Image (cartoon, rainbow, N blue to C red):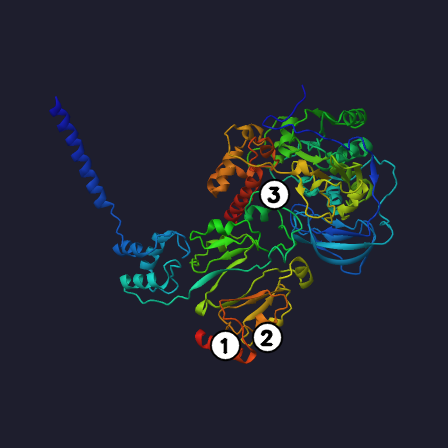
Amino acid sequence: MILIAVVSLGAIGFVGAGILYLASKKFEVYEDPRIAQVQEILPAANCGGCGYPGCGGFAAACVKADSLDGFLCPVGGADVMSQVATILGKEVVAAVPMVAVVRCNGTCSSRPRNNQYDGIKSCTIASNLYGGESACTNGCLGYGDCVVSCAFDAISINPTTGIAEVDEAKCTSCGACVKACPKAIIELRKKGPKSRRIFVSCINKDKGAAAKKACANACIGCSLCKKQCEFDAITIENNVAYIDYNKCRLCRKCVAVCPTGAIHELNFPPRKEKVVEAKVVETSETENK
Amino acid sequence: MLKTFRIGGIHPPENKLSAGKQITGLALPTQVIIPLGQHIGAPAQALVKKGDIVKVGTPIAKAGGFVSANIHASVSGKVAKVDNVLDASGYKRMAIYIDVVGDEWEETIDRSETLIKECTLAPKEIVDKIAACGIVGLGGATFPTQVKLMPPPGTKAELIIINAVECEPYLTSDHALMLEKAEEILVGVTILMQSVSVSKAVIGVENNKKDAIEKLTSLAKQYAGIEIMPLKVQYPQGGEKQLIDAVIRKQVKSGGLPISTGAVVQNVGTAFAVYEAVQKNKPLFERVVTVTGKAVSNTCNLLVRVGTPIRYLIEAAGGIPENTGKIIGGGPMMGKALITADVPVTKGSSGILLMTKEESVRKPMSNCIRCAKCVSACPMGLNPTHLMNLTEFAEWDGAEKNHIADCIECGSCSFTCPANRPLLDQIRFGKGKVMGIIRARKS
């Protein structure tokens, strides 16, 4: 009895195996083995910061492309990209390191709250309903959609200021927070030499008086910084200044003239006497080159 | 047995504190702020500039598209500026500021109280006149009335349903209007019937307004084809689709237009505005607004010019009570909390509700206990708890498949939830998102 079962099951197994083998040959899809190799090197964060759906998508795109120009894994950075380049036998294209920047400095003290929101603690839902707790409808709401979106624990809400803050050591510039912020406050900017960078920490598009009334630290579009800038890096549009990080030479003159303190400088050494400041400008210029 | 809609529904405490209060006029403010976008659709385009002199009823902005409405000056005086104003949602919108000087009306407006029953205009002329006078749905959704009176090709209007339900708790503006302007409303309904060439109209009134039902029923005998239908008190009966179901027992298909059932639904306030526009040449620049709340000393129904900051209305009702927690524009179910009392009255403002601190506090939310109360409460037959989960995890495909776009944002689910889950907040957000996706796919 048992023999019949063994033989018949065995026969079915063989036939099935045969069909599967033939099918696998017939319908085989060739996959470049390098895709798997590249994927092995990638950090497997699947953050989508490169603009592709996950690390697999990025690996396939890298293999397919003619040159690696424009390809950057923001998590792995230059290291990983050079390894990818070695596998693919392509040239490494040096990518500029970027970092997320929160362009709001309307702290709790400078931006008086004129109402209270008691709904779901989500920026997207709150901004869907109304303008926000202060008179500034452009400012950071502080409910932390960016914090939730960050896969690297690099962004947090500062409890004293009520504004999102980026930990630049952890930030991989994947851009998840940029997409998550309903107010479009967060921007990816050039990290800059020695992480030094200057940016306008405000996106309030209201006219000067209204902006100032809503927040003491708001950019009022007075264009003093624009006049001061020797490199034509600052533009004023919709009553708010914007610094082009590709043109900015980090001279810090705009920071000094801003009447509301809306322009922020990061990681610079403390300001010295005026004569010495000129020197700092020079060094930062050379660093930039 | 009284009729009502067949799916879902709730019965919140009615709290009609200002019922029976007469409509009183409100003194003119010193300045009015008339927003350019006070209707659904494209904002109107300003026709005036700083320094222009306007009279009451002067057109100051023209419709900015097919679905849009004209706007008229509600006061006489000088245009102070055309600038941004914080609207009810706390965002800035364009508005026309007019400094009030005297109270001089356009000569074309008939200000007499005499009732004019006869209307010999052709349907097209009526619709044009309604459009010119900037009439929008006064129930709160502010959909331009003329658009509803032009059924799209392939559909045919069979009857007019007048929404005199006023199912929102607290609000009594429609009730007051029905008691004081019953004849005018009935003439307005006749004109609406004429405009879409139908011979039948049903006025649906909830049974908690017995005096209004009696008054309308006795007067309606003189008007051919108008029936008054008392309805069982049930929220949200004032929803267009719910009212159609209650009155003619027809369901509007998911994503379909109400006109597919042959019904054209208009609010009772709109019917009155239509009467004034067609018979008296009076554009829509004032409306009845209820000011109410448990702590309000003098709840009232006020006849207010559009653009009046609501601060004036609250003062007329005895000022802001000490323990006010929230000021709501509209009723407690669908209204929105306002961030300041400087928000102007718009064509869609049906009431101002001052909630006490105890009433307005949000109770702490806990986990869903799967009781399905929200499912039985949803008047659109949706599954709110499922939709909330889908939007929370950004499952837009799933949300669309589960008909999130059909949500009418009535808030019955949030109201009924024993775990105090903010179902509507989440679903409203998801609905907006899904509608955006659908629109993007179509274009």
Nearest to N terminus: mark 1 or mark 3: 3
- Disc 1, SS: helix
**Dot 3: chain letter:** A
In the rendered image, which quarter is residue A50 located in?
A: bottom left
The kind of residue tagged 1 is: Val
Tell me the distance, in whole angstroms, between the alpha carbons under discs 1 and 3: 48 Å
Relative to residue B98, is residue A233 drawn left or right?
A: left
- Residue behind mark 1: A280
> Residue, x 77% and y 37% (percent of image)?
B296
Residue toward you, A222 or A114: A114
**Where is A25 relative to A166, above or below?**
above
Relative to residue A244, is residue B126 drawn left or right?
A: right
- x, y percentage for residue A192? 46, 68
> Residue, x 45% and y 77% (percent of image)?
A286
Nearest to N terminus: mark 3 or mark 2: 3
Residue toward you, B238 or B20: B20
Quadrant containing the C terminus of chain A is: bottom left
**Dot 2: chain letter:** A
> Are discs 1 and 3 located on one and the same chain?
yes
- Residue behind mark 3: A118
